[in-house]
Amino acid sequence: MEYRELGKTGKRVSVIGLGCEYLDYRPYAQIKETIDAALAQGMNLLDVFMPGTEVRENIAKALGARRKDVLIQGHIGSTDVNQKYDISRDMPTVKKYFEELLKLYGYIDFGMLFFIDSEEDYKSVFETEFITYTEKLKRQGDILHIGFSSHNPIIAKKVIETGVPEMVMFSINPAFDMLPIECDVRQERDNSFRSDLYHGINPARAELYKICTQRNVGITAMKAFGSGKLLSPDHTPYAKPLTISQCIQYALDRPAVASVLPGSQTAAEVHQVMGYFSATDEEKAYAEIIRGPRNDFTGSCVYCSHCQPCPVGIDIATVHKYLDIARLDENNVPPSIRSHYAAMNNADCIACGHCENRCPFGVQVIENIKDAVRLLVD
């Protein structure tokens, strides 16, 4: 297992964690088997958004004394009044469900403001007692960090600009990244992906990743497989389906992403996603699949590292991540970005052109590396 820092939280999370959604309505023995397999493989991040009492109790029972070994994303506002899953902003209901979660787990590492996808969602959280209650939970130590979940990059950016959250759970895969701004990712997923929609990366999503890195807001990625449709020959918008390893690599290549949380419901599925670590670089490479006549990334780095190896050892994808952030506001480049850049192997580019010849998207790498020096070197 590999681990990454999750933004400003100071926590190191496994790059593959466990999305527990598919453990809902499963027998305890299956839940314990899945949890045991995840922890044995080094997973230390669990997303427990489900509001049902039984699944929460079974996960807590399966963890037992190992609760201290994991980091839990617990969602504030996830409810199932009358056994019907719902998003609630009614404070007595919100408190009831979250405080039941606290009783089971003692504390929650990442208290997630649940499902902020619209202006109405935003107002119902940040202009009500909801946020006051959440901040009180943090002061009391009931939650250690405040995060939120979203599928909408414009609203997610607005939440981040409040300065409240330290991390975000966001839906990330290449199909979602390429949907136009006006499309609802959940609706397109449910309707099957339509290849005619894809015309390069959605600029709002690209900007969100940059803003998260700029402000050191860590990202945990959900929906990396597009509910399995990107893995299916019948539903993928591309010429052929992606593999599990390619989807995981794509999400981990996005700026600020620390962990991918596939939903696994059996030990076998845990081992299947862990196959990512035994896959070769060629098996993880996704650029040739997502590139196509409708998917115009021309001139834009997607951080796929297809350009590597560099003969002088420059990490070209990482340089582009920092450069993209610096270009957001060239007059106010965050000191942390300069510091991260300074810590890299900043060998002088010899302009050999090897990277540009290998790049599937026609990125002007040599000029960009020069621009990085201009913007990132004090």
Image: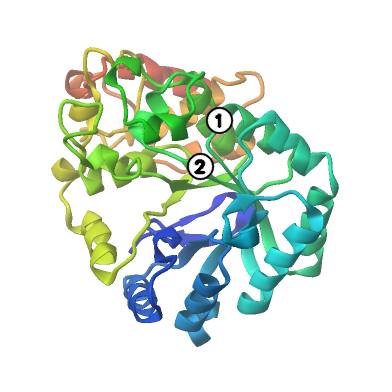
Q: Disc 2 residue type? A: Phe
Q: Nearer the viewer, residue 68 or 264?
A: 264
| Sequence-first disc among 1 and 2 | 1
Q: Where is residue 149? Give x, y as percent.
A: 58, 46
Residue 187, numbered label? none
Q: Compared with residue 111, is residue 161 higher up or lower down, i.e. above or below?
A: above
Query: Where is residue 19 drawn, in percent x and y?
Result: 43, 59
Q: How is the image coloured?
A: rainbow
In the image, 241 versus 326, the foreground residue is 241
Q: Position of residue 182 (x, y in %)?
A: 51, 18
Q: As drawn, which residue projects farthest toward the bottom?
A: 65
Residue drawn at 27 percent across, 57 percent down: 273
Q: Which residue is mark 1?
A: 153
Q: Looking at numbered disc 1 in the image, what kind of residue is underneath it?
A: Pro
The residue at 66%/24% (across/down) is: 332
Give yes or no for contact between labels 1 and 2 (Cβ–Cβ under 8 Å).
yes
Does any portion of residue 378 appear in the rendered image?
A: no
**Which residue is the site of mark 2?**
170
